[in-house]
Amino acid sequence: MDMASRLFKLLDEEIQNPKVALQSATPLQLLVATILSAQCTDVRVNQVTTGLFARYRTAEDYANADPAVLEKEIRSTGFYKAKARNLIRCGQVLVSRFEGQVPRTMDELITLPGVGRKTANVILGNCFGVPAVVVDTHVKRVAQRLGLADTDDPEKIEVALQRVLPKASWTRGSHQLLLHGRHVCRARAPQCQACRLYALCPWEGKHPV
Ligand code: SF4
């Protein structure tokens, strides 16, 4: 078994059921939650979307939102002016180009305001069952520390992880790296003493155990 397979086998033991922490029941809700999650915790986003999703049910609702009202509703997620602008424009594009539905391809998703490859991959992998490698700050850090990628470019990290994971495991594997980074291999204080991957981890900065 190669190194990457051994690492993901251990991650399978550590994180058996990787789930997106953002609460949503539809592709539109996950899209909105993911846009709101930039520079914000999932817990805070979930607090905000509980009320938001009751008031905004369709793409039309976002398209026709009053910017000042929406800004106030999402204020606590930070960068609320830009996020409100993106949500409204996103709703307008969904209505004008996609009949109010969230599209199902990367090429279409990244035409939406405020949606980059990371958000598009979250939607593809979690809503539409399309294998998708999500690269956020945690995935980037853990992939680098584990020697799975040696670049800072998220798109190149995405390709590197696509190479070492079976396609059917792209969504699951990248989400396991995300959760491992969030809870164990933290940016400033990695919990190396509690890490299942310790023996295989090649990072020279890992804490001695
Ligand atoms: S041993 Fe430490 S640095 Fe390596 S993956 Fe585990 S937590 Fe991260």
Image (tube, rainbow, N blue to C red):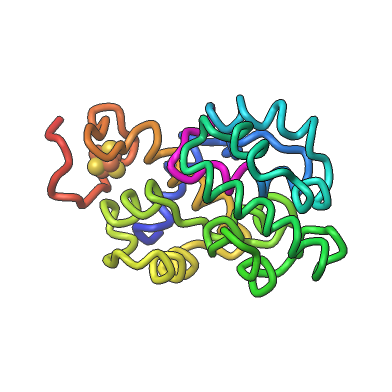
- Dividing the picture into quadrants, the one containing residue 101 is bottom right
Quick check: can you spot residue 198? Answer: no
Residue 109, given in percent of the width and then of the height, sits at 66, 66
Please tell me whether residue 189 is drawn above or below residue 98 in the rendered image: above
x 30%, y 36%: residue: 186
Q: Residue furthest bottom?
A: 107
Above-or-below relation of 174 to 199: below
In the figure, residue 20 lies in which quadrant?
A: top right
Residue 107 pos. (x, y %):
65, 74
Towards the viewer: 125 or 114: 114
Q: Which residue is drawn at 13% across and 49% down?
A: 204
Query: The magenta stretch spans which residues?
Result: 33-43
In this picture, is 193 found above or below 170? above
- Frontmost residue, 92 versus 123: 92
* Quarter of the rendering occupied by the N terminus: bottom left
Query: Residue drawn 56% across and 48% down?
Result: 83
Q: Can residue 74 be seen in this view?
A: yes
Q: Does the magenta stretch include residue 35?
A: yes
Quadrant for residue 26, please give it: top right
Q: Residue at x 44, y 52 (%)?
A: 136
- Side of 166 where 40 appears, left or right: left
Q: How many marks?
A: 0
Residue 196 is situated, as x and y percent measured from the top left of the image, at 34, 35
- Residue 88 shown in magenta: no
* Image quarter hosting the C terminus: top left
Please indicate whether residue 126 sits to the left or right of residue 54 in the image.
Answer: left
Left or right: 39 in relation to 151: right
Ligand 1 is located in which of the four quadrants?
top left
